[in-house]
Amino acid sequence: MEIDAAALKPKGFFQQVETDKFSLRLCMSGGTMDTTYVRKAIEIAEKYGDSVIHLTSRQQIEIPSISDVNVEAVLKMIADENISTFIGGPRVRTVLACLGASVCKFGQIETSGLAREIHKLYFGQELPAKLKIAITGCQNNCVRVEANDIGIRGVGHGYLFYFGGCFGREIRIGKTILPVLKDKKDVLKVIEAAVAFFKTNANKGERLGKLLERVGIEPFKKHLESVL
Ligand code: SF4
């Protein structure tokens, strides 16, 4: 059976070392998974994979070893169940979150709901390069926010932003530019402004940290301050 691996990638299927097998990445946000979603992932893994599930470093479920002959059946299953799959490429990626103040006693801010809100607004939006966002509830920093293009950490029941981080082929630690924000509405305004600045100014493939190195922090800082 001839299968177009490149066409399957945007649908969440990644061709494995064995070229007739695919690993399916599902998408979720906010750092938690609904149990019905987990059950469905288990069902796919047991029916079409090797009965194993991988949990990725970006809080996603990945189901390896789906045979190419079963891809169509899995696509139908995820469409019927309205399950979202991973989106890669130059887009806003899944928003990470720890459990935050609604569950964790150390939490200074609520994280999951905010991550879902941001995810709903921006996930999959086309940009010059990928943009990763993460939210952590306190100084323990369970989701390593400085390793993301936009990170938010709970500090004294407020929100501290980090900008320009990445962790992969290149490693860059995100920087703080703004004071701690107390109002969630301001957080959403800053994210909107940061995404817009990135969209307008970044070159193709240029991550936010590289853009800020090229144009300098000041124009970005001024742009963010203008919405507060
Ligand atoms: S970062 Fe803080 S609030 Fe979030 S899970 Fe870790 S300890 Fe809890």
Image (spheres, rainbow, N blue to C red):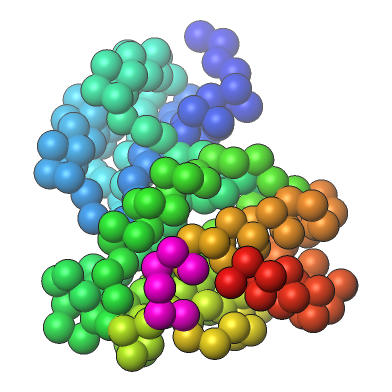
43 w.r.t. 186: above or below: above
Query: Is residue 70 shown to the viewer in this render?
Result: no
Where's residue 171, x and y in %?
A: 65, 76
| Rendered view: 93 above or below 77 | below
Residue drawn at x 45%, y 40% as measured from the top left: 86
Magenta-drawn stretch contains 226: no
Along the line of sight, which residue is nearer the eye, 69 or 25?
25
Q: Is residue 143 above or below residue 67?
A: below
Q: Is residue 30 left or right of residue 195?
A: left
Highlighted range, magenta? 181-186
Farthest top residue in view:
1
The quarter of the picture where residue 184 lies is bottom left
Quarter of the image where the C terminus is located: bottom right
Report whether residue 105 is seen.
yes
Point out residue 159 in the picture as x, y percentages from the top left corner: 42, 79
| Position of residue 194 in the picture relative to residue 185 (left or right) | right
Q: Is residue 205 above or below residue 175?
A: above
- Residue 91 placement: quadrant: top right
Give me the residue at 35% from left, 52% from top.
116
User: Residue 72 in the image: x percent, y percent?
Assistant: 39, 13
Measuring from the top left, give residue 174's x and y in whole percent: 61, 79
In depth, the one of 87 and 46 nearer the eye is 87
Q: Residue at x 20, y 38 (%)?
A: 37
Q: Residue at x 37, y 42 (%)?
A: 27
